[in-house]
Amino acid sequence: MKRTAAIAHCGFWITSLVLPASASASFTASFQPCELPAAVSGGSGVLARCQVEFAGGMGTVELIGRPPNQLREAVFRDHAGHTVQRIAMSVRPFIDPENVSIIVRDMNFDAMPDFGIRDFSVNGANEPWKFWLWDARQDKFVYHQTLSRLPNPEVSSTSRVVRSYVIGVDNNVTTHTYIWRNGELLLRGSAVEPAGR
């Protein structure tokens, strides 16, 4: 894969929500709508409320924190508005009139949507994400440390692999390919593409 293609994949993950109007947005990856409530003055409050599918049904996730984007919690609610899970976190995702950098999709090929959020508090070409995978036995999202360490992640449902594109200081792009085996993310192989190709 050429370096520009790898960067394009990274851009796919960076650009996660695009607003058709000032009060709503949609996931780039899964095209689900979000609301951006009125600005919270002073303290903390709901910064974004997105319709998502999780736990086998439709519901919402509320991103709660201090404006403009200091998140302290993600609250998942079912279709009736009952709280299913609260996830404490300290991240700075994109939350503005054009973008909300979260993704809800199946990351481990178990047919259940998982939850990821981009942390813009860390700068650079190697984008950090944090991921929580849905655990049907516990009936909740569980933080996945290994997946959360992969910069610029990309999931291929067709080939059932996860790829991570690491951009080096020399602008070389190293592609690491991972597979899931018995719930563990295992490195299958790596390839380096020199800069300028």
Image: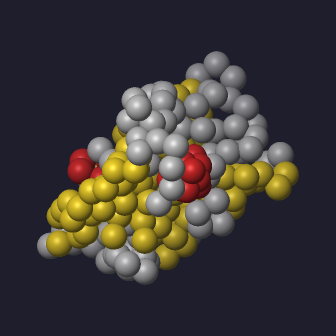
Foreground of the two, 172 or 58: 172
Residue positioned 69% across, 23% down in the render: 41
> Relative to 140, is 171 on the left or the right?
right
**As drawn, which residue projects farthest toward the front?**
197
**As drawn, which residue projects farthest toward the left?**
182
Residue positioned 41% across, 32% down in the render: 170
> Relative to 28, is 58 on the left or the right?
left
Residue positioned 73% across, 32% down in the render: 39
Residue positioned 25% across, 69% down in the render: 179
Image coordinates for residue 20, horizontal then vertical, percent: 82, 55
Image coordinates for residue 51, horizontal then vertical, percent: 61, 62
Residue 38's place in the image compared with 62, above or below, is above
Quarter-of-image position of residue 182: bottom left
Looking at the picture, the colour scheme in use is secondary structure
Q: Is residue 128 visible?
A: no
Foreground of the two, 32 or 139: 32
Residue 91's place in the image compared with 9, above or below, is above
Residue 155's place in the image compared with 23, above or below, is below
Quarter-of-image position of residue 115: bottom left
Quarter-of-image position of residue 34: bottom right
